[in-house]
Image (cartoon, rainbow, N blue to C red):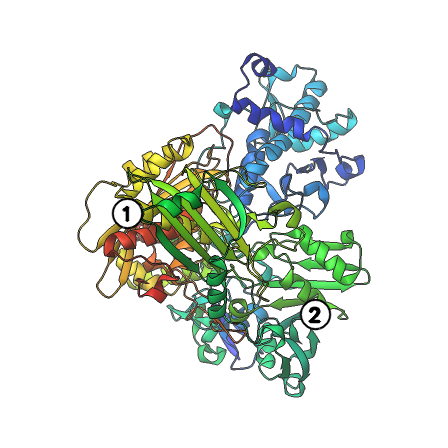
Amino acid sequence: MSERLTSAPMSRRRFMQRSGALLFAAQCPLGLSAKAVAGGSGAMMNSFVRIDPSNVITMLANNSEFGNGAYTVMSMMLAEELDVDYRSIALEAAPTSPEYYSPLFREYLTAGSVTTGSTFIPMRTAGAKARTMLLEAASRDWDVPMAELSTADATVTHAETGRRVTYGELLEVIYRLDIQPPETVVLKDPSEFKILGKPARRYEGAGKVDGSAQFGIDIKLPGMLYGAIARPPVYGGSVVDFDATEALAMPGVVKAKAIRAGVVVLADSYWRAQKARAKLKINWDRGANATISTEQFYADYRALANTPGMLAEDIGDARGVLDGASEVVEATYEMPLLAHATLEPMNCIAQVEGDTCTIWSGTQYQSNDQEVISRFLGIPQQNVTIHRPLMGGSFGRRSSKTADYTVEAVEAAMGESVPVQIIWSREEDIRSGHYRPLFVHKLRGSVDDSGMPEAWHQVAVGQSLMQGTKHDPTYMVRGIDIYSLDGCLQEPFGVFPYGTSYQIPHHRVESHNAPKSGIVPQEWRSVGHTHTGIAYECFLDELAHKGGIDPMELRLRLTKDHARMNRVLRVLKEKCDWDKPLERGRGRGVASRIYNISPVAQAVEVTVADNGNFTVDRVVCVVDCGFAVNPLGIEGQVEGGLAYGLGGVAFGNIDIVNGEVQQSNFHDYPVMRLPQMPKVEVHILPSDEPPTGVGEQATTPIAPAVVNALFDATGRRIRRFPLSSQGFNLV
Amino acid sequence: MKLEINGKEVEITSEADTPLLWVLRDELGLVGTKYGCGLAQCGACTVHVEGSAIRSCVTPVAAVADKRVQTIEGQAGEQGLSPVQQAWLETDVAQCGYCQSGQIMAATALLTSNPTPNDAEIDAAMAGNICRCGTYPRIRKAVHLAAALIAEEQNT
């Protein structure tokens, strides 16, 4: 194998194989001890792999599973190099220690659609290193060359003599001969893959059809109390005093106490806690947000958008060209606050004992939870233990930078001798959560004599996700939050190594961080693209219309120097029958975006009735995510990702009046339902590039593609959202 | 109060107005049935009472005394997974999986009353079950597959 490595030219594929070996040479401590083997508890081959004498292979997963498929791709990667069935691998959540931090984020965080890309080398390396040790053990024990040995189904075989030994049985040999992990290892060539690149069903799928999958909300610890919190009616308000006499007299109720989040009722069942909560009498201090309203945000942001912002990009002379243009197209796009509305509401179990704290929490962001709790309790970070169950969706909500739903459970559990589980009601989720920030984008543009976009001037206004947080140094550039403009800039910006795939000769983009409003902004699946995608792709459609150029053709021309996106668009144009005429009342729209490296484009067909009711009949999505580790998983993420974005643009909306969120549950915060789901066709482009993400990518083009299709069908531009507020109802 | 859950009689002590959902989850430990909204808006809590799909989050437990209740935990029999569960697994429907107990219970009830539903009938019957991960295309596919598996079972 090493021969091929040195004789072959250093292709990107080779790089994929080698870089991990270098990256991981220093890590992977051997935690093997005679005691562990003798005691049958198994041995750590490296940070990610434990093998038991009974031949159970356990993976320590340092990425969270919330529907994203992390457990599937990671077990596939490990299994591929270790020559075992990925479904036979046992899985444990890796502990929250720096050893397991994401090499990309330098934190224990699952986000940004980077799990597949960032684990592709480490997990394979872990598997390959463990396999090498097992082969060396068998080779030395049997005194046969390693080259004569083969591995399959967690067994080493010597074909010539017919000898076989399980991985578990080899632990004793590894210990006896003091076999050490190899410094470097050569990973399989993709042509040798048996698992990677083939459609694979979800690793933890079985428990998700028989009801046995354990989510955080399902955990019941001995003696555990359930807590329901009465939260202030105004976002960010606080408790003055309360009377719990009536609540405490109800069956099963143990206690009511004020915490920072409100008043928590502790009871022996969640229903009893919820019921008693309704009997609390509370005086609230409505606080600093008592007068805020989303209508005021829109007005303030619109005004700001007319003033110069912080300059992020200035290519050519956009202002000069626009000043001299005979015609300037102008538009303002306004995007509302959005809730995440994960189907499993936020919940967390906490137990505080002396100077230690243990939580059971569905979370994307373990290291931050640990940090916030340790600060809150004044205990060392390593004294906070996090158990991670499966999550009933997250979409960014469970990567809370304030650790809101986690630290409040800790606060509720302080002074209690038993664990306490806080569960949010749906109403709390909609009214007291964190939100996709409200954004206003003002755009001006002009086209040249050929009709192509010539000048582009965009001013974005919205609350920054990162300003003033610990991420400030990483994601703020000269005061500009790079997420506020993700997908608006032509050149790479800050730590984002990519721009739009388009080339417009005069391109100027500015940004205002809206004043802090008391609302806690939070990443929502695809983050900045949730609003920049609409502003950018819809205004591009406006310029295409102004220049008399077909929107697909326009994008093909704008991406002529971006090979990957251009290929995506060429395939899309063919697959979606772009040139086939549609009947009256129907329309077609396109949008193309790059989020975290993977280019993706979608074309949609809509049918609009006279009363504004519309259906999305068909979505064709082409994605280039590099090497497709699990095509079945990718297809699911694309379907789901676009469903999430479609529901958001169609009816997602949080209104605040006098500090109070007006929506409360799924009847007034509607989300996608089965009848509204379009037919989706997914095309994954074959590629030898390193794998990149798909969890959020398909969310980015769907909203603008639908808005552009509605224009195509009706001639009406929609620039305020959701669509349902503008007379267009997705049915 | 006595209940019949998944063919077994159980004695419960919760108050009569407690929603069946919380009796199942908090008192009986049958946590495969999920809480999602508490308002019969999302379908995560779907169970069967006398074979029909109901929302257990708004059904007081007193209303189902002496009635036959089926939950997701009762769907697999001695022969293994039910045809609907098999179809769900084979189609790789689940993502986060939180809504899928409710989806499977709704689909099972649909196929009992209509063994060969078309897409429109599936859409109508399953519209009350929200999936935030957007597994809807595979839900449609899995219901068709389950219908075929049930038909096959009956023919053999």
Picture quarter with the C terminus of chain A: bottom left
For the image, the number of numbered tags is: 2
Q: In this view, does A400 lie to the left or right of A303?
A: right
SS at mark 2 in the image: helix
Q: Which of A56 and A314 is in front in this view?
A: A314
Task: Return the mark for residue A412.
Answer: 2
Residue A169 appearing in the image? yes
Q: Nearer the viewer, residue A655 or A607?
A: A655
Chain of the residue that carries numbered disc 2 in the rendered image: A
- Label 1 crowd (10 A; few <14 / some 14-19 / many >=20): some
State the image quarter where residue A572 is shown.
top left
Q: How far across and how far down the image is residue A83, in percent?
A: 57, 30
Residue on which the image places disc 1:
A545
Q: Is residue A57 above or below residue A335?
A: above
Tell me which numbered mark, 1 or 2, is placed earlier along the sequence: 2
**Which residue, as the protein is rendered here, is positioned at the far right?**
A354
Q: In this view, does A627 lie above or below A404?
A: above
- The answer to whether tags 1 and 2 share a subunit is yes
Circle 2: residue type: Ala
Q: Which of marks 1 and 2 is in front?
A: 1
